[in-house]
Amino acid sequence: MRIGIAKVMQETSTFSTQATDLAMFADHGIARGPATLAGESVWDGFVEGFREAAAGHELVGVIKLQAMPAGCLTAAARQTIVEWFAADLAQALPLDALLLSLHGAFVAEDDPDVDGLLLQTARQLLGPRVPIGVALDLHANITERMVAAVDVIDGMHTHPHLDMPQTGRRVARVTLAAADGQVRPVVSAVKIPLVTPAETQISDEPPLAELMAATRQAERQPAILCASVFAVQPWLDVPEMGWCSVVVADGDRGLATAAARELAGLAWEQRRDYTRPCPNYRDAIATALSGDAWPVVIADLTDLMTGGGTGDSTWYLRELLLRQPEQLCCLPMVDPQAVAVLTAAGAGARVTVSLGGKLDYVNSTPVEVTGDVLRVIPVTPGRDLPESMGTTVVLGLGQVQVVVFERLGPGADPVIYQGAGIDVTQARILVAKSVVDFRAGYADVAKRFLLGEAPGLAPADLLSLPWKRVPRPLFPLDTTFAWSADKAVAWSSDPRPAGGDGT
């Protein structure tokens, strides 16, 4: 069988100050057609799972492009990406199945559901008989258009996100079985009027642990092919916003709907357990500086690089400079203008520079600092830092060291420090630009994890955001309404009719 593989991925925050354009995708490399499978091309874990499960079949590369999380995709970029996708998919035909790696929270200025638009485009090109399977992030925002276009939807069960390959394998196995006539998947999805803070969505802690266990329990039923609960990226102001349960069953729509309703009901029962007070960043720094065990990794969660933050908040920088710590404290900063100044000065120079507060101009202001340029790390083949982050500079401000990048990077991974030549084991404080995934990234480094909320684009307090487009009522924006999973509308999909010619 000829199996098409494609990846189009971005996680959007509609509250971000930075629009997403084609240049942001180019930073990570854009591959089209056969080039997507050539050489040592690095895919995400979803696609690695696809390829493992599809071994022995002819794999056909369609397109691969990805951008770091940011604001809405420009209308011009959306048009180009959809045109590329349609052209490359048409060129790849005929296909026996299509496997897609998407995030599920991709929003454009002129379309709140880019993932749904891509899936709809794929269905129109492939027709009703070719199965489409899509692997999604746990924080996807499921829409009716997405459900209507596909045969298989499945998402990660873990946060931190550790099961991407497993999710890809599940999607591929079911989709290929459908292509081979072994199963006839039907999808049922129940939208839940719920949005919750991201920092309390930890899959091995309650309440999410119980819900993820329920999805795995559902999958033990012989006729259920896969089950997911999507906890939605919470910084999306879009018309179909909210949690969603999705179950794919083998030919039994009633079973899929019943299981999806059961999962949705459990999520609704737990809704109040996700809202908890989040510590202040000043308190987090004070705790880290007073403790005996370190390194302490503090999550600057409202400026997370992996969810729509700009990476240039200055609140932690100001507080650390005020406290003048006696041990090494490190934080990242995205500031291309500062990188240019520091690079021009060169390693060893003492420089005064305006740092941070330029991208998130709503919540931060620049800080003028004078320090020593410790290292300048250009983009070179084989360097330890991702090339997509651009030139990197380490700026020393006494015991505070700032790793300054041109562009966003992996805020949940200590590579941002290690790749810049910092021995993370010697630091008292390491600031991570992440909300939950940093717990996995720094597992071998941290003696303690802390959260510390500062003003930012991705607040824990969801009530503080200027919501305009979400459906109402929506918990916790509204708290007094009643909702029942048993009475909720279930979106269904069965695009591959049994018998007939499929037209």
Image (cartoon, rainbow, N blue to C red):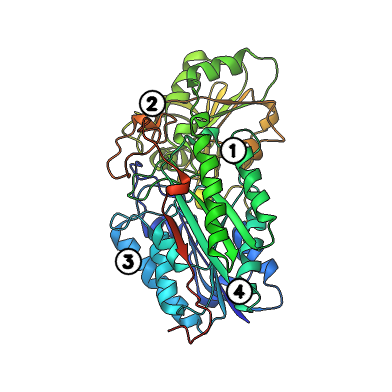
First of labels 4, 3 by sequence position: 3
Q: CA distance from mark 3 to mark 2?
A: 38 Å
Q: CA distance from mark 1 to mark 2?
A: 39 Å
Instruction: Identify the residue under disc 4.
Output: 178
Q: Quadrant of residue 478?
A: top left
Looking at the image, residue 160 lies above or below residue 478 = below
- Considering the image in quadrants, where does the C terminus appear? bottom left
Q: CA distance from mark 4 to mark 1?
A: 31 Å
Q: CA distance from mark 1 to mark 3?
A: 37 Å
Kind of residue at badge 3:
Gln
Q: Residue at x 55, y 40 (%)?
A: 266
Depth check: 35 or 440 in front? Answer: 440
> Which mark identifies residue 79?
3
Side of 363 where 303 appears, left or right: right
First of labels 1, 3 by sequence position: 3
Question: In this view, which residue lies farthest toward the bottom?
Answer: 501
Q: Residue at x 41, y 42 (%)?
A: 193
